[in-house]
């Protein structure tokens, strides 16, 4: 599948098979996130890979819309050290790792982010320095569903020259 097809077909999956994701695939996904562009090449993004069921349960308890983290065999916590463009940089890394996961036959769902009231609790749970910021929680595994959400048509969202 080429990159354009991956972009067209990637979906947020909230039901997962219990099968663990092999470490070599996790490393490929993480490397894609690491290689994402960052403002001024600052590279503030860090990843915490959570495969421990108890720790995923703790994350799921914090994330009001991430209860399915208990089903996904892996959660990638995307964090950033303080930096001017940390949110943009971490979001680019999150998107890139999600697309890489799709290319490798894995499913993902972006769950949480910087503005959630529990963000600092996630940072602490991961053992990161308190000044770090949560960018995202990403459920990752082999999907047990194939969602088909509707998207707005292209002609409804594109404006030429002026809005």
Image (cartoon, rainbow, N blue to C red):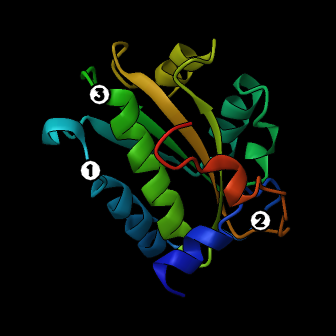
x, y percent for residue 131: 33, 13
Residue 104 visible in this rendered orientation of the protein: no
Q: Which quadrant of the view contains residue 46?
A: top left
Residue 162 visible in this rendered orientation of the protein: yes
CA gap between label 1 and label 3 equals: 11 Å
**Left or right, residue 149 beside residue 100:** right
Residue placed at 21% from the left, 40% from the top? Answer: 43
The image quadrant where one finds the N terminus is: bottom right
Residue labelled with disc 3: 85
Residue 152 marker? none
Find numbered disc 1 in the image and state the secondary structure of the residue it sits on.
Answer: loop
x, y percent for residue 37: 26, 50
CA gap between label 3 and label 2 equals: 36 Å
Nearer to me, 43 or 55: 43
**Left or right, residue 95 beside residue 128:** right
Residue labelled with disc 2: 18
Find numbered disc 2 in the image and state the secondary structure of the residue it sits on.
Answer: loop
Nearer to me, 130 or 1: 1
Residue labelled with disc 1: 37
Find numbered disc 3 in the image and state the secondary structure of the residue it sits on.
Answer: loop
Nearer to me, 26 or 39: 39
Q: Which quadrant of the view contains residue 72?
A: bottom right
In front of the other: label 1 or label 2?
1
CA gap between label 1 and label 2 equals: 32 Å
């Amino acid at each position: 599948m080429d990159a354009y097809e991956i972009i067209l077909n990637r979906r947020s999956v909230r039901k997962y098979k219990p099968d663990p994701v092999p470490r070599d695939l996790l490393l490929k996904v993480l490397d894609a996130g690491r290689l994402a562009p960052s403002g001024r090449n600052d590279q503030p993004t860090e990843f915490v890979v959570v495969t421990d069921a108890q720790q995923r349960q703790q994350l799921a308890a914090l994330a009001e819309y991430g209860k399915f983290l208990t089903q996904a065999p892996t959660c990638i916590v995307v964090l950033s050290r303080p930096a001017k463009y940390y949110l943009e940089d971490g979001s680019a890394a999150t998107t890139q790792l999600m697309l890489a996961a799709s290319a490798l036959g894995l499913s993902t769902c972006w769950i949480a982010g910087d503005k959630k009231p529990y963000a600092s609790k996630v940072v602490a749970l991961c053992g990161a320095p308190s000044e770090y910021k949560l960018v995202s929680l990403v459920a990752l595994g082999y999907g047990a569903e194939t969602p088909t959400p509707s998207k707005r048509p292209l002609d409804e969202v594109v404006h030429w020259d002026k809005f």
